[in-house]
Amino acid sequence: MDGLTPWPADLEARYKAEGHWTDRLLGDVLRGDPAAPALVAGHDRLTYAELDARAARTAAGLLALGLRRGDRVVVQLPNTAGFIVAFLALVRIGAAPVLALPAHRESEIRYLCELSEARAYICADRDGDFDYRELARTLPVEHVIVEGEAEEFTSLASIDAEPAAAPAPAPSDVGVFLLSGGTTGLPKLIPRTHRDYVYNLEASAELCGFDRDTVYLVVLPAAHNFALACPGILGVFATGGTVVLSPSGSPDEAFPLIERERATACAVVPPIALLWQDAVTWSDEDISSLKLLQVGGAKLAAERAAEIPDALDCQLQQVFGMAEGLLNYTRLDDPRDLIERTQGRPLSPADEIRVVDEDGKQVARGEVGELLTRGPYTLRGYYRAPEHNARSFTPDGFYRTGDLVRELPSGHLIVEGREKDQINRGGDKISAEELENHLLAHPAIHDAAVVGIPDAVMGERTCAFLVIREGGKAPGLREIKDFLRTRGVAAYKHPDRLETAAAFPRTPVGKISKKELAARFR
Ligand code: J2J
């Protein structure tokens, strides 16, 4: 595959010698007892043997369709059994799923298909009012595979053939492409190799103490790194537990599932944790089976972190992760103080951390600086993005996270802010530049600057500052949302608020001062 940046030979040798990289493949993660429950999804209940058989038959069917090792396939499915089966089948034949979120629309999906030169698009039939098949009709792919009503396309259920011997992928092959939160005009693709992602999920499962008694409730999109592999769905499969899929994190859907399936662990973003903390006071459901709540994706305030264990009668784990790789976890046996105040410390002894100032010089320990990292499961380059890579990595291969952190003597990190031009809306990442480019296409808009503004529940919301063209009429929020919908931009990227300005404040070098714009809300 072109467009990839491999690890250098010395580090490859080290990661193998230290046992982080093995030959285990993503397609072989189903390690539970054949008769044990592997997956509960809607009315589907599958044992490990049943899930394995379905994945094998679907893999054979994909081969019969002509898909091969090294192909890319854009997958856009909600939390359904189809997602799990399609994912396992693709990684088994070595075709890499490109994991889009269900909320993505034409703007994102078309771009992903084009960038990855995807041979196929696997989607649901609909999501409420939205029809994925209509979107599929406009895409430059050979095959469209639909879970549900397929209309003129191939239905996922019909992808079925007798399994036969087929060539396996190499552990160094890309197993899956994850989406970056994005800081530039267009989102980036993160190649995760079989061996780095297997390490990611196995080491995470061990750290979290997952075993065959774990019943893991999925409330975030299964396509998100946190829910998929930290330890997530794949970490549960590798340790023989049960995965239960929930359509969302709403207490109305999640709590009955926790009660019915006796769920023991779950990963959420801070706004969901706050919602649950409140809901538990009025809900009738018994969620006492829940032992571990992982919270990550955005900063959890220390005050909230202090309340959660008592409110939900479970253990709290803070997770500061990124689809690019590095995962920080508070440990289950960390002192309460560290669990409440920090976002954890790196998963692997081979994770290398640097906290640097604006000139790239290491700051004194305890000072705030940008977090740089490299390690056995952190990417060395985005897919097909040489110019962006030149900026996002140091010459010696450290990834510039854009996160501002402080490192404690224990190695725990506290996230203090962000340097990257991104809004973190309750865990959903929005590239300011991407949204600005869409806004600039509006006929009445002369200039646009998108900033995050503080919000008690979401952490941040999105505010678009607009300079209106001379003689133009300032569009309202409703009009802007309709405009962005027409352009096929996912709804979570739409601004929550508009402000007009005569001109933007500038920095001494002439750039728009987003700090000053954001400060208008403090
Ligand atoms: C503050 N900021 C955080 C935290 C992520 C586990 C958990 C999260 C993600 C994720 C993930 C944060 N406090 N606890 O992939 O496996 C912000 C940082 C980071 C960016 C990455 C996982 N946890 N963040 O959120 O790729 O800014 O991954 O660089 O979506 O989210 O976003 P993403």
Image (cartoon, rainbow, N blue to C red):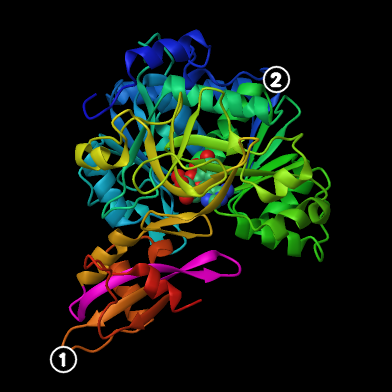
Q: Mark 2: few, some, or many residues within 10 Å (few <14, many ≥20)?
A: few
Task: From the viewer's side, name the closer residue of 505 and 480.
Answer: 505
Badge 1 vs badge 2, beta-carbon distance below 8 Å: no
Q: Is residue 446 magenta?
A: yes
* Residue type beneath disc 2: Ala
Residue at the extreme front of the image, as rendered: 364
The N terminus is located in which quarter? top left
| Mark 1 lies on residue | 471
Residue 71: name its quadrant: top left
Q: Is residue 251 above or below residue 409?
A: below
Q: Is residue 182 left or right of residue 215?
A: left
Across and down, in percent, residue 162 comes to: 43, 16
Q: Secondary structure at mark 1?
A: loop
Residue 87: name its quadrant: top left
* Residue type beneath disc 1: Gly
Q: Secondary structure at mark 2?
A: loop
Residue 382: name its quadrant: top left
Residue at the image point whose x is 73% and y is 31% from the top: 214
Give the residues in magenta: 442-463
Q: Is residue 374 magenta?
A: no
Asked if the beta carbon under badge 2 is closer than 8 A to the nearest atom of ligand 1, the reply is no
| Mark 2 lies on residue | 35
Residue at the image point whose x is 52% and y is 11% from the top: 18
Q: Which is closer to the viewer, label 1 or label 2? A: 1
Residue at the image point whose x is 51% and y is 50% from the top: 368
Real-space Cα separation, disc 1 to disc 2, in angstroms? 70 Å
Of the image marks 1 and 2, the number of the one nearer the N terminus: 2
Task: From the viewer's side, name the closer residue of 56 and 367.
Answer: 367
What number is the disc on residue 160?
none
Across and down, in percent, residue 197 comes to: 47, 26
